[in-house]
């Protein structure tokens, strides 16, 4: 039996320590005391942590059983540590508790805004944890709201309830990591698993902050796993569950259909069965929450261009916030998404091609979406891990960690809103875009995320980006 590589052992110890230091730095930034020192500590620890992450990816290979203990165990220990902390980078997990309380009380979160809790006892307690009553009615789907409603009975104990939310996100992350391992060809399996399971953005935003993107990511990867096993109905149900958590995976629908059609998986029986299952899931999920047209109000309110961190949002200020500029930005973003979806669907033939297509679509969406937050990279990272696209995964991870505390730093007086918007846009979006353009001048995005017709097989992604 081969011994554990000393380099991997060192990186494992360093990773645990650096996560602890990063968590401490985030807490210090949230407290607002000695802000400059706390920011310096955060970026020093996070930068070193990201370097360790990259080194681990390039270290893993044919590992012994002892090494597997580290590969699985170190992130597990780290995530348990993050579960014990309280969210500080974002207030979303606390807002989930308001939706959970509303749903548990029989009130639809589609009709009762999160900010309504401001004057309640729950709102006053949440405020003491840094929550701000800024969110309106929920933009999330009924699958998430039905799931989060189980937290409703515990919201009187905020710390226990928010940790339960984080536990749900952690469990989803663990299941996704297992699916990534199972779906990837043996030659790249260890690396793909490590890319996702060790990823600092995934760990901090899921186990640390409790974002519901982890549920959406699990459902998407599960749908791909089911489709690979030719379980079309199960794949349709899983993808629908993802869409009914956050709507974004709906963009993958055409590519899924093209894959199923080209591989002879669409028959009248499967179409009828899948359609029936989708309708049944939708009705069951919406049944206790349905509020008519108001059920989609939350999505509509976040869709328009405004000066926020995003490519389209930042350009609003450049174009002087003119109504015509809004129309142009909407049309440009919609055109970019349509082109990406058509191109991705046209090149989808095998499972690896479908993964590449979904990766293409989600990256284009992130680049042109009306708003960007650091946790939006979780789904791209999962798909890029399946595609064994190491450099782009590292780039998205690094840039997301750089911008992750900027909103908190602004709230503590460390920078202005304008500065935050431009820093987030340039670092988290335009730097990855520059890499994509530089890396793939001829074949655009598919090559970047690992798509190569010469390396595509019918059994799964066998490509690799050096």
Image (cartoon, grey):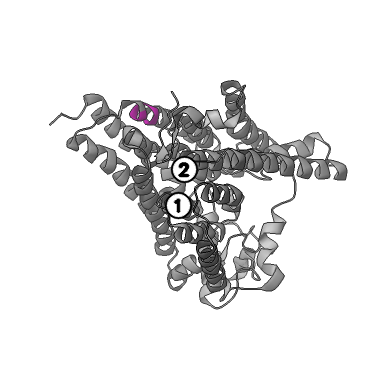
Quick one: 440 or 88, which is closer to the camera?
440
Quick one: 271 or 62, which is closer to the camera?
271
Label 1 neighbourhood size at 10 Å, few (<14), some (14-19), many (20+)?
many
In this figure, which residue is indicated by the disc labeled 1?
227
| Figure check: 230 above or below 416 | below
Q: Secondary structure at mark 1?
A: helix
Whether residue 28 is visible here, answered yes or no, is no
Residue 439 disc label: none
Q: What type of secondary structure mainly makes up the magenta span?
A: helix
Q: Secondary structure at mark 2?
A: helix
In this figure, which residue is indicated by the disc labeled 2?
351
Q: Which image quarter is the C terminus in?
A: top left
Residue interval drawn in magenta = 53-57
Q: Which image quarter is the N terminus in?
A: top left
Query: Is residue 344 shown in magenta?
Result: no
Query: Is residue 56 shown in magenta?
Result: yes
Residue at 15%, 29% (x, y): give it: 2
């Amino acid at each position: 039996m081969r011994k554990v590589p000393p380099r991997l052992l060192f990186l494992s110890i360093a990773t645990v320590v650096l996560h602890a230091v990063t968590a401490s730095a985030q807490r210090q930034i949230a407290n607002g005391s000695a802000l400059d020192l706390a920011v310096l500590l955060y970026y020093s620890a996070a930068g070193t942590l990201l370097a360790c992450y990259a080194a681990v990816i390039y270290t893993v290979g044919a590992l012994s059983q002892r090494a597997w203990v580290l590969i699985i165990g170190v992130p597990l220990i780290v995530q348990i540590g993050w579960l014990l902390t309280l969210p500080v980078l974002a207030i979303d997990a606390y807002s989930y508790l308001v939706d959970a309380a509303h749903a548990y009380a029989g009130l639809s979160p589609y009709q009762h805004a999160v900010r309504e809790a401001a004057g309640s006892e729950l709102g006053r307690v949440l405020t003491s944890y840094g929550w701000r009553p800024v969110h309106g009615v929920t933009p999330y789907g009924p699958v998430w709201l039905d799931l989060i409603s189980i937290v409703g009975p515990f919201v009187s104990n905020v710390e226990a309830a928010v940790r339960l939310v984080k536990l749900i996100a952690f469990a989803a992350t663990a299941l996704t990591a297992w699916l990534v391992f199972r779906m990837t060809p043996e030659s790249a399996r260890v690396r793909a698993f490590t890319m996702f399971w060790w990823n600092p953005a995934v760990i901090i935003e899921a186990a640390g902050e409790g974002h519901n993107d982890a549920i959406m990511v699990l459902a998407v990867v599960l749908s791909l796993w089911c489709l690979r096993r030719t379980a079309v109905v199960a794949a349709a149900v899983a993808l629908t569950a993802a869409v009914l958590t956050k709507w974004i995976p709906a963009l993958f629908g055409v590519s899924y259909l093209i894959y199923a059609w080209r591989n002879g998986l669409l028959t009248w029986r499967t179409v009828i069965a899948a359609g029936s299952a989708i309708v049944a899931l939708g009705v069951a999920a919406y049944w206790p929450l349905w509020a008519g047209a108001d059920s989609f109000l939350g999505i509509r309110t976040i869709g328009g261009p405004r000066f926020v961190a995003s490519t389209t949002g930042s350009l609003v200020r450049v174009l002087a916030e003119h109504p015509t500029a809004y129309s142009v930005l909407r049309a440009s973003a919609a055109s970019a998404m349509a082109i990406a979806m058509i191109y991705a669907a046209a090149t989808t033939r095998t499972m690896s091609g479908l993964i590449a297509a979904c990766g293409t679509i989600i990256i284009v969406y992130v680049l042109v979406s009306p708003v960007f937050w650091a946790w939006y990279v979780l789904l791209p990272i999962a798909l890029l891990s399946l595609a064994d696209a190491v450099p782009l995964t590292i780039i998205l991870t690094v840039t997301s960690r750089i911008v992750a505390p900027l909103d908190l730093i602004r709230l503590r007086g460390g920078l202005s809103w304008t500065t935050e918007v431009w820093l987030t846009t340039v670092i988290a979006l335009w730097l990855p875009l520059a890499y994509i353009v530089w890396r793939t001048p001829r074949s655009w995005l598919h090559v970047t995320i690992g798509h190569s017709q010469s390396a595509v097989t019918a059994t799964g992604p066998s490509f690799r980006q050096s």
